Image (cartoon, rainbow, N blue to C red):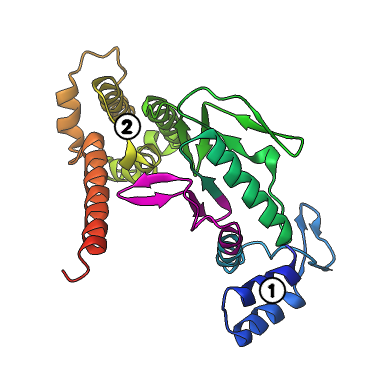
Amino acid sequence: MAHNKLWHVLGGMGIPSHLVCLLRNLYKYQVATVRTDHGTTDWFKIGKGVRQGCILSPFLFNLYAEYIMRRAGLEESKAGVKISGKNINNLSYADDITLMAESEEELRSLITKVKEESAKAGSQLNVKKTKMMATTPIDNWQIEGENVEAVTDFIFLGVKITADADCSQEIRRRLLLGRRAMANLDKIVKSRDITLAMKVRIVKAMVFPIVTYGCESWTIRKAERRKIDAFELWCWRKILRVPWTTRRSNQSILQEIMPGCSLEGRILEAKLKYFGHILRTHVQVESPFL
């Protein structure tokens, strides 16, 4: 985004002028260098964008996006999805924005409005990176001569989302990522200098969180439950260096490892915590005097 446009937007959002002046001075003379294998390049001035790792950039972008959404009239628009009696047509996270509607015509209208207001604010909607997904089959669109690709699944914030809301693909993908993480710990798992208890703690800290990422929204059936249990036992057998061909019961493996809460139990705990968070939020909104 162009900085001149950004300062104008911040002023239009009601941010005091002295804070806008402070932010402008922070970015006015910013310079950067590129680190390579042969050293670093000469320092050069940054005309657009922000420094790598700047903690202000996500906040500034969110303000910028909020300004565009307001100018596009999304708050007053009737297009959207009804959730708990509220009309929701957009979700924002860092530099990702999701638009939601109940019909193809409403969605096309939302995208067109956001694209037009983005251009007015000095930003540009990248249609090539924009994906469209619907619960029913839908064809590709064209907006001002550019194709908007219709997909049946895509990765959003690290989670695979499908048009039929089936979690089995995401669970399978997470288990594969967990196996890859376990393979990266092969030297640690096989080391005789590390105690068994420490190996179990390492797996719980570095492998299980990869598998359970986003599990709060999973719908787990018997087939997925068996796969999750099989993955956990595979991890423990790998730690104990017990192959599947060895005639040793799963119960004896668990008795030696003593993992405490199972992987499936961790998933259930995360789901219940998230449910409690949503319930408390709903109670606070509906009954502010409680």
Residue nearest the viewer, comparing 110 with 195: 110
Q: Which residues are magenta?
A: 67-96
Report if residue 92 lies within the magenta region: yes
The answer to whether mark 2 and mark 1 are in CB contact below 8 A is: no
Report if residue 120 lies within the magenta region: no
- Point out which mark residue 8 bears: 1
Quadrant position of the C terminus in the picture: bottom left
Q: In this figure, which residue is indicated by the disc labeled 2?
A: 239
Distance between mark 2 and mark 1 Cα atoms? 58 Å
121 relative to 165, above or below: below
| Residue drawn at 22 percent across, 40 percent down | 268
Where residue 213 appears, as percent x and y from the top left, is 38, 42
Residue 61: quarter of image: bottom right
Residue 260: quarter of image: top left
Q: Amino acid at mark 1?
A: His
Where residue 76 appears, as percent x and y from the top left, is 49, 57
Asked if residue 94 shows in the view, the reply is yes
| Residue drawn at 35 percent across, 44 percent down | 202
Judged left or right of residue 198, residue 72 is: right
Where residue 176 appears, as percent x and y from the top left, is 43, 28
Where residue 160 appears, as percent x and y from the top left, is 47, 34
- Point out which mark residue 178 bears: none
